[in-house]
Image (cartoon, rainbow, N blue to C red):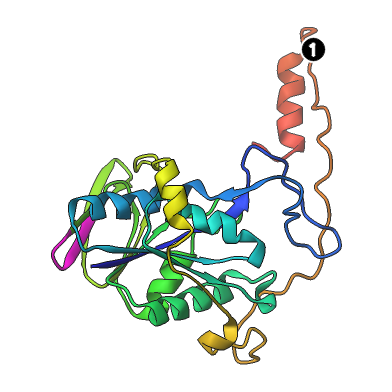
Amino acid sequence: MKIVVLVKEVPDTYGDRKLSLETGLADRGASDSVLDEIGERSLEVALSFADKNPGTDVVVLSMTPASAAATVRKGLAMGAASAVQVVDEGLVGADTGLTAQVLAAALQRTGFDLVITGNQSTDGAGGVVPAMIAELLDLPLASSLNTVEIGEGEVSGERAVEGGSMRVSAPLPAVISITERLPDARFPNFKGIMAAKKKPFETISLTDLGIDPMDPAAARSIMLTVSEKPPRTAGVKIVDEGDAGTKLADFLAENRLV
C-alpha cells in the first residue's frame, strides 16, 4: 500500500504571528518555522500502520518554499520512505483553490492508495483543502477523524458529532483528514536523521504539474487591502454605586448584546 501524507511548514505557534503590510502575506521571518503538528500526527498514523504492515510505502508531500526543504525532510527522519516538495515562485500567496489544485495534481503524479492530511493547518486554519482535494480527485473523503483503521481496501474511523460520535468508512483509494485526538508524533532518532539524508527527495514545479497559477479560467482569491490589527484597548469598567445593574443593562443595549 502507498500512503501519501500532506505536511506543511508553518510559523511556530508559540512565536509571534504577523502580516507583512507590503505583501499582505504572513511574515514568516517573525518567528521560527516548524512542521505543522497536525501534519506530524497524520504522518504518525501512516507510520504506525507501516510498522505493522511491511511493504507499506509512506511518502510525505508538501507545497512549500524552497527554504522549507529541511522542515519537510523531518518527515523522512521520522520514518517516511520518500518526500515530494512542490516549489514555485508562482505559488507565493496561493489561495486554497490553487493549493488544492496543485496538491491534487502532485498526488496524481506520485500515485497513492490513501491520502492522509490534517483537518486544518495552524496558520491558515481554513479547513477546506482536504475536501477540495477529494473533489478534484473524484475520491471519497472521510473527514475530521478521531480514530483511524486502515484495512484491506477500506479505511474507517470515528468523528465527533453533536451528542455523540459517528463511524464512517470509505473504499480505497480515498482521502482522510484527522484531528488532534490522534496520538502525538514520534521523535526522529539519530539513526532516522542520518538515514533521511539518503532517502529520495524530489522537488517539482508548476511546469512539471502542467498548472498555470494565472489561468484566467480558474477562480482565484485576490487580496485588495491589508491592515494591522489595532491594539487592544481597556474595556469599560462598571463600579457598583447602587446602579451597576442599570449601567450594565445600558452597556449591553448600546453594544447590541441583548
Residue 179 spot, x, y in % from top left: 39, 48
Q: Is residue 254 left or right of residue 206?
A: right
Picture quarter with the N terminus: bottom left
Q: Quadrant of residue 14?
A: top right
- Marks counted in the figure total 1
* Residue 181 can be seen in this image: yes
Of residues 23 and 184, the one drawn nearer to the viewer in this rendering: 184
Residue found at x 77% / y 13%: 243
Q: Which residue bears the numbered disc 1?
A: 239
Q: Is residue 75 left or right of residue 21?
A: left
Magenta span includes 255: no
In the picture shown, does residue 127 fall above or below 140? above
* Residue 40 can be seen in this image: no
- Please name the amino acid that badge 1 sits on: Val
In the picture shown, does residue 56 fall above or below 192? below
Which residues lie in the magenta part? 151-158
